[in-house]
Amino acid sequence: MRILIEEYQYDVAKVKDILHGIDALENVEGKVSIHYVGYYYNTLLKDCVFILPKVLLKDVDGQELAFGKYKPEDIVSPDQNKEMEAREKDFLYKFAVWIYRAIVVYKNDKRNDTDIVYHTKIAQIGKGMRRLSNTYLDILLQLLQFNKDNQSFFFFIVKNLHLGYNKINWTRTISREMAIVQSGQPVYLKPVNKKRQINFDEELLVIFFSILNYIGDTYGFAKDIKCQFNLIKGPQFQTYLNGYGLTRLRQIKYKYFSDKALELWNLCYAFFDESRQVFVSTEKKEYLLVKSFYIVFEAIIDELIGDNPLPDDMEKKQEDGKIVDHLYTAKSLIESEAAQTYYIGDSKYYKMGHPIGDESIYKQYTYARNVIQWNLDIFNRGEQPKSGVRLRDDVTEGYNIIPNFFVSAKMDETFSYTNDGIEKTDRKNNRHRKEQFKNRLFDRDTLLLFHYDVNFLFVLSLYARDNASQKAAWKQEVRKKFRTEIQTWLQDEKEGFAFYAMKARPGVDARQYFKMHFQDILGKTYTPYDSEEVYSLALDRKDPEGDNESLLAELRQYFIVVPCGLGADPEPIIEAARKSDDGTVPAPEKDGVLMVMMEYYDNKSKEFISSGKLAVGIKYTPDSMEIVQNLSSIGYVLFHHRSNVGQHLFAVKGACKVVQSKAVEADRYKNVETTEMFVVVDIDTTVELDASVMDASKKECTKQTRYDAQYSRLKDLVAPQ
């Protein structure tokens, strides 16, 4: 097996023989680069060549290195590179299978541009011109082809296995069993049947179909298993992969004599051995290549994140010629229930660590403006969009927040295919805010842009398996992550906004007020809630115009104005404020409680009682998301262990915020060490509040979440007297 990397500039002299049989290359000053990804057979070297995506490359001190460690020229023949680790060689050996599967899935999707795929028959086992091969992909393809071509062989074996089974052996029955004579006829109560013996043909078929089942579940190949055997699965099959498969096959090898059975045995043995060489037939020229792999990457991300077709009959190609990669509707950032908005994404297929250029950022803002106009045009025609999204509010003339995001690929350093990597992005400056006017979040020209790195191996394998339920589950999860992270950033204590809910006081005509004070509230207010009488107010915490306090004072004369975090229900907050309304309605006391499960409090509290600095671990769970959505209302921290005894209550100083683990100060106490995100909170430890009337057990939890932090309101924890 030979390895090349897409778009890397190789010296022509070093790779001339390897490139035999492939064209469409760029040759500049003795350098050559390949603009394909995939697989082809080199008839000159009688070996297969895999061209892998450029995402394997990382820029290190001005050099493009594979895995950030090796020059691509040095891994052209991985088996001959003594410096490469065994896990890296094993990764390359099986990574090619995922690339092959992704291209096949892309090619079979009629929605995609298949003109970029070049395919002629991959080598199959059989007679004819033959070559030695030990690639994992070849072995898998041969196993699948053998299953396809030998159905009659399987059914012949199965038929023989059951021939005469359960038929009474009268000779043995008469000689061994006592008969009861009834009406002159002997009756045998225990007839002797034909006994089933260990059948090695059956065992070989069980191993073979178990392999097909495994590669179907793992890589997404069609299983097509028509024989109903009890297959080897799960941990038991893992023991076969760990060595028992080879051992068992060696034990039963000499039980087979037919050519087909021996051929099947060799294929099964090659699968478990991986390094074993087997004969395969080959065409003069065989390949599965795709040109412009960035198009495939876009298709992968769109399948896993976007809506297809696009919502509200939008076209990917916009009127100004711009092509939007991904677009979907999901829950609005402000409303907690069913309100929807558009999320606009763009895929960036780069080498690892490649920065996003200013031109790409500018284009993304253009996409957003086009989508806004599309939505406005629907309403201007007197129609309603199918999605129900309405971006412009006619009362306040504010615009809903439209999140934009880039998605680029990174390589997991541990070669994990199970971690999406989204929540662990360490890219600097991955957030951008474009605005024409300061302090106007609900403005058409205020656009938010985020940059996410995703584990290329995760999305590649998820797409290649082509499992609808797995794709749908991750789509829902990643959309929730996007929304939560954007909400967290927008409410950041330093660079975010303070959000309020407003409702007109009795006798005040809100519409008339907005008309009269249009310039004061333009871009700061919007109507996102089910109740059209409740408005959202967003004020930049940096207060660039220096009039936030005066605007709040002015609005409170005509509206009930209360802090209301993104995603929170404003109605109960406004109702509580209305009942205590004295005519000015000051901002209500924060009644949110951050509940921290802490056993052995006396010992652990010594770590933070003097400083009051806490970092409470949270996860991507409903309980943690409730904490994030109510950060601005947290006024207390309650330490407990799921009962009404041993509780300790403290008031919060300042505001809470969410940070990644690496951003937590060294002198701040972490209640756990196993999470990626923390709520940073300072508590007033000079006075411990009375917690005797509270009962932490009133907040429900499951066995799995009993140690997790939770959010509650003070009144909901008060025990009945």
Image (spheres, rainbow, N blue to C red):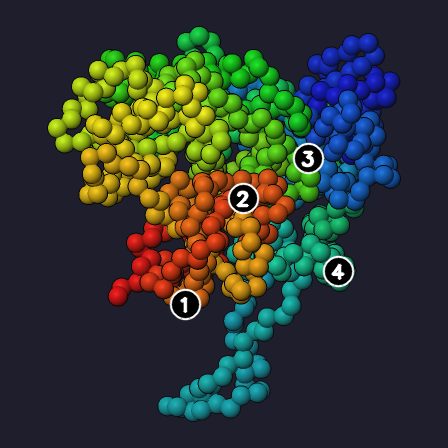
Residue at the spot x=37%, y=21% of the render?
Answer: 547
Q: Quadrant of the N terminus?
A: top right
Tag 3 residue: 96
Cα separation between marks 1 and 2: 29 Å
Tag 1 residue: 645
What's the amino acid at mark 4? Thr
What's the amino acid at mark 1? Val
Residue at the spot x=25%, y=36% of the render?
Answer: 585
Q: Quadrant of the C terminus?
A: bottom left
Tag 2 residue: 677
Cα separation between marks 2 and 4: 46 Å
651 up-or-down from 61: above or below? below
Q: In the rendered structure, find residue 247 and report the number of the disc placed on it.
A: 4
- State the image coordinates of residue 140 (x, y, percent, origin top left): 66, 42
- State the image coordinates of residue 199 (x, y, percent, origin top left): 64, 64
Q: Is residue 230 visible?
A: yes
Q: Nearer the viewer, residue 109 or 479?
A: 479
Disc nearest the viewer among 1 and 3? 1
